[in-house]
Amino acid sequence: MPHDHEAHRHGEAIEGGHSRRYNRLARLLLKSQYRRIAADIAAAAPHGAAVLDIGTGPGLLLRALATTRPDLRLTGIDLAQDMIDHATENLADLRVDLQAADVANLPFDNATFDLIVTTYSSHHWSNPESAAEEIKRVLRPGGRLLDYDFERAPFTTLETALPATSRTKFRAPWSLVMKTIRFEARRPMTEQ
Ligand SMILES: C[S@@+](CC[C@H](N)C(=O)[O-])C[C@H]1O[C@@H](n2cnc3c(N)ncnc32)[C@H](O)[C@@H]1O
């Protein structure tokens, strides 16, 4: 499971044995955490919204979201093909688009998504400046980013591209060991 210490290598995909262990532990321990985050996202997502989960890992958040809100059109990306393989297996019975990709070079057209979400991934991104620009590009004007991550995540960098609307503590079942910040930002309707 992700925790507030140096659990994984930074700026890299989580692959091979690391991804297998992550998949197993997350499936065993984190389902309640993702249900709580999915409920929070569901409250923010317009009906039928196109939602992208960046750094989806084994796809457990997407699974909880698909169950809570079957109207959403869900896409997940991860830098690690191994993680995408686990997500494909974990989401085999659901309609979710999954592919390996880097947040710093997203394979989507401009203004594709109404909502972009990401959990415990942004502190791994090796190029948060490009990530911020790419997230802004693929969000439709007025679209929102919700990033649930540790305090050391690059929230300040994300804010340079997308004005933050809030940054608060997020309470979820594993809050004591996974001290999580909920960062919300919005792409302006018009560029200033
Ligand atoms: C701690 S895991 C979190 C996975 C999942 N979001 C969750 O909450 O269980 C971080 C994930 O971010 C992915 N990642 C790291 N750098 C990335 C990048 N530049 N672009 C996309 N995904 C990345 C890793 O491969 C890994 O699957």
Image (cartoon, grey):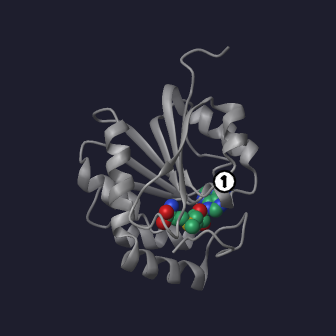
Placement of the C terminus among the 4 image quadrants? top right
Where does residue 180 sit, x and y in percent of width and height? 53, 57
Q: Is residue 89 left or right of residue 128?
A: left
Give the amino acid type for the residue marked by disc 1 in the picture: Ala
Q: Is residue 42 above or below residue 125?
A: above
Where does residue 76 sit, x and y in percent of width and height? 46, 54
Q: Is residue 88 left or right of residue 120?
A: left
Q: Which one is in front, 170 or 75? A: 170
Q: Is residue 47 above or below residue 5?
A: above
Q: Which one is in front, 84 or 118? A: 118
Where does residue 184 sit, x and y in percent of width and height? 53, 38
* Residue extending farthest front: 176
The residue sitting at 73% across, 43% down in the picture is 130
The residue sitting at 49% across, 67% down in the picture is 176
Q: Is residue 80 left or right of residue 63?
A: right
Q: How many marks?
A: 1
Secondary structure under badge 1?
Answer: loop
- Please give the residue where the numbered disc 1 appears in the rendered image: 153
Where does residue 163 sit, x and y in percent of width and height? 62, 29
